[in-house]
Image (cartoon, rainbow, N blue to C red):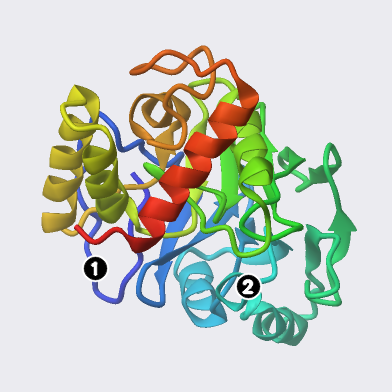
C-alpha cells in the first residue's frame, strides 16, 4: 500500500475498502497544502519517477529522496498554481543533479513555458509506461487528463473527483458534461487519481441530491470512517463513480442508480442544475 509520506510516519497496514482503491506499488500519493494530492509515478524496474501536477516542490523533493527516486519528468493537467506552482523549483532541483526534466502540459499560454504542449489523443512516453492525453475542458478551457490504458490508471486533475467534479471556472456545463461522459466510458476497473481530498463534502452533497440511494449512503459511511482514521479516500474506481457520483449517475448506460437520460439537452440542464446547487451546498 502506498503511504502518505510524512516525517516519522510508519507505513500503515493495508485496509480493505469497498469504494477506496489501493494505489499500485509504484504510484505514491503525496499530500500538499490543505487538501491537495500530488502524484508520483515510479519506474517499477528502476530509480526514476514522474510527477503529476506539482503545485508544491518541497514535499515531492522530500518524497523522492526518501524513496531514492530521481525525477525524470512532469505531467500537468491545467494551469492553476496549486497544480504547477512547484515546477520551477523542481527544474532547479533536477539541474543541481545535472538532469533536465521533461515537462508536458496542455496547449495554453498559462502553462509553464518549459512544457511541451500536448492535446487530445497525443501519447506521452514515460520510458517505462505510456499514457494518452484526453481533452477534458470544463474546469478550465484547456484541461487535460492522462490515461494509462495498459495499467487502467487515470490522472484527471480537477475534472473528475471522488463523488464529484470540478467547478466550471472557464467551461460551459455542456463542455464539462461531455468531458465527464468521455471519462465515464473508460473501463470500469480504471483507478481514478484526482487532485483533492474532497470526498466527504462531495458525498454529503450526493446524499442530498439522491436521498435514499443505498450505495451513496454506504460510500459516505465508509468515507467518514476513513477520514476519522486519517486515511485518504482516493484513488477510487470508475465503477464506484458510476454508482455513487451524482454527476455520473444516469450519464452512461453502464451507470447504476437511475436510468440513463436520453435527451441531451435535458442531460445538460440537469447537470447545470446539480453543479450550481453544489456550488452553494453546505452540509
Q: CA distance from mark 2 to mark 1?
A: 30 Å
Residue 202 in sight: yes
Residue 161 in sight: no
Q: Secondary structure at mark 2?
A: loop
Q: Residue at x 22, y 53 (%)?
A: 231
Where 99 falls versus 152 (above or below)?
below
| Of callouts 2 and 1, the N-terminal one | 1
Residue carrying label 1: 9
Q: Residue at x 76, y 57 (%)?
A: 142
Where 36 falls versus 232 (above or below)?
below
Checking the image for residue 67, the label placed there is: none
Q: Position of residue 167 (x, y in %)?
A: 52, 58
68, 179: nearer the viewer: 179
Q: Secondary structure at mark 1?
A: loop
Residue carrying label 2: 80
Q: Nearer the viewer, mark 2 or mark 1?
A: 2
Where 262 falls versus 88 (above or below)?
above
- Please identify the quadrant where the N terminus is shown: top left
- Please identify the quadrant where the C terminus is shown: bottom left
Q: Position of residue 60 (x, y in %)?
A: 52, 72
Amino acid at each position: 500500500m502506498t503511504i502518505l509520506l510524512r516525517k516519522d510516519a510508519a507505513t500503515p497496514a493495508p485496509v480493505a475498502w469497498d469504494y477506496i482503491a489501493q494505489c499500485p506499488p509504484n504510484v505514491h500519493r503525496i499530500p500538499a497544502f490543505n487538501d491537495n494530492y500530488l502524484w508520483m509515478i515510479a519506474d517499477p524496474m528502476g530509480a526514476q519517477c514522474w510527477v503529476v501536477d506539482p503545485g508544491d516542490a518541497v514535499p515531492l523533493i522530500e518524497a523522492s529522496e526518501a524513496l531514492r527516486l530521481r525525477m525524470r519528468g512532469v505531467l500537468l493537467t491545467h494551469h492553476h498554481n496549486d497544480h504547477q506552482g512547484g515546477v520551477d523549483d523542481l527544474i532547479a532541483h533536477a539541474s543541481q543533479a545535472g538532469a533536465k526534466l521533461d515537462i508536458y502540459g496542455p496547449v495554453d499560454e498559462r502553462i509553464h513555458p518549459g512544457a511541451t504542449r500536448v492535446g487530445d489523443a497525443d501519447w506521452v512516453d514515460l520510458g517505462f509506461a505510456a499514457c494518452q492525453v484526453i481533452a477534458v475542458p470544463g474546469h478550465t478551457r484547456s484541461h487535460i487528463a492522462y490515461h494509462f490504458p495498459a495499467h487502467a490508471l487515470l490522472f484527471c486533475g480537477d475534472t473528475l473527483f471522488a463523488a464529484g467534479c470540478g467547478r466550471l471556472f472557464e467551461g460551459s456545463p455542456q463542455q464539462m458534461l461531455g468531458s465527464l461522459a468521455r471519462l465515464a466510458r473508460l473501463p470500469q476497473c480504471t483507478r481514478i487519481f484526482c487532485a483533492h481530498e474532497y470526498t466527504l463534502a462531495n458525498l454529503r452533497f450526493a446524499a442530498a441530491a439522491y436521498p435514499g440511494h443505498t450505495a451513496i449512503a454506504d460510500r459516505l459511511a465508509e468515507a467518514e470512517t476513513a477520514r476519522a482514521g486519517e486515511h485518504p479516500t482516493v484513488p477510487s474506481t470508475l465503477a464506484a463513480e458510476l454508482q455513487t457520483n451524482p454527476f455520473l449517475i444516469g450519464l452512461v448506460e453502464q451507470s447504476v442508480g437511475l436510468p440513463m437520460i436520453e435527451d441531451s439537452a435535458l442531460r445538460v440542464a440537469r447537470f447545470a442544475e446539480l453543479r450550481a446547487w453544489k456550488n452553494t451546498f453546505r452540509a
